[in-house]
Image (cartoon, helix red, strand yellow):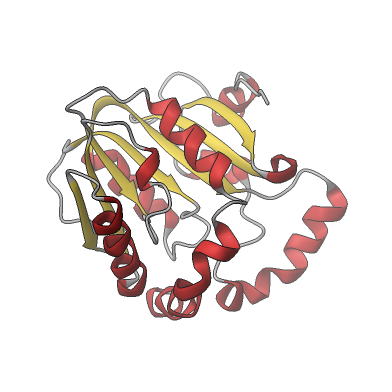
Amino acid sequence: MDVQGVRAVYRRYARHYDFYFGKVFHQGRKLAIDQMGIRPGERVLEVGVGTGLSLPEYPDGVHLTGIDLSPEMIKMAQTRVEDLELPDVTLLEMDASAMDFSDASFDHVVAMYVLSVAPEPERVIAEMRRVCKPGGRLYIVNHFRNPNPVISTFERAISPLSRLLGFRPDFALDEFVERNDLDVVETRPVNLFGYWTLLTTARDPVAHSTPSADLERTVRSH
């Protein structure tokens, strides 16, 4: 996976993205936004806003900024904003691994269906932390490697096709948490068969326990 590869994949996906990924991913988008408990006047950053499918789910009074690497996806999101007359939404073409925002610019930062697509997910997490206000939380909706040994074997087998698929099918949750020193607050299975995960983490790196201990104390609910 690299930047040009991601752009090429989503150039192909853009026109039909809503048809293929709208309803099937809707629950995860809605739960992530609900989980934030956004108050009027707060600033939210959505990393990887895509065609803007999540935008109508945000509550009134939020100052929303959405970024995406794909100009085609941003163009479609802007059309959605105009058609729905959504207030106070700013859309920008931007690389999530090198954001142009100042430190502590947002009350909430969310990335939905992005990290297994990003060429450098650790840099994306670092940037999400940087632009989030101290004490805030990061919200991540993503597919992680399935614990079922049969399914995980298949995911590993097709991982060489990541560039063609546009995402990493063997993205491991425990390794991701450990590499990024994430303080996991909660995880929830979402979407069809719970195949995806809503991961809520503290903005600041964990300093009081091991990553494995954090995963053990994670709340899992349906």
Q: Quadrant of residue 75?
A: bottom left
Depth check: 113 or 206 in front?
113
Query: In the rendering, at what x and y percent does residue 146 appear?
Result: 74, 47
- Count of all numbered marks drawn on residues in the image: 0
Q: Residue at x 67, y 58 (%)?
A: 170
Q: Residue at x 48, y 37 (%)?
A: 30
Query: In the rendering, at what x and y percent does residue 154 appear?
Result: 80, 62
Q: Residue at x 25, y 63 (%)?
A: 94
Q: Quadrant of residue 155?
A: bottom right
Depth check: 8 or 211 in front?
8
Q: Is residue 139 visible?
A: yes
206 above or below 73?
Answer: above
86 above or below 78?
Answer: above
62 above or below 48?
Answer: above
Query: In the rendering, at what x and y percent does residue 70 appear?
Result: 35, 71
Depth check: 50 or 203 in front?
50
Q: Residue at x 16, y 56 (%)?
A: 100
Q: Quadrant of residue 193?
A: top right
Q: Is residue 176 visible?
A: no
Q: Residue furthest left?
A: 102
Q: Residue furthest right?
A: 150
Query: In the rendering, at what x and y percent does residue 164 appear?
Result: 59, 78
Quadrant position of the C terminus in the picture: top right
Q: Is residue 162 left or right of residue 30?
A: right
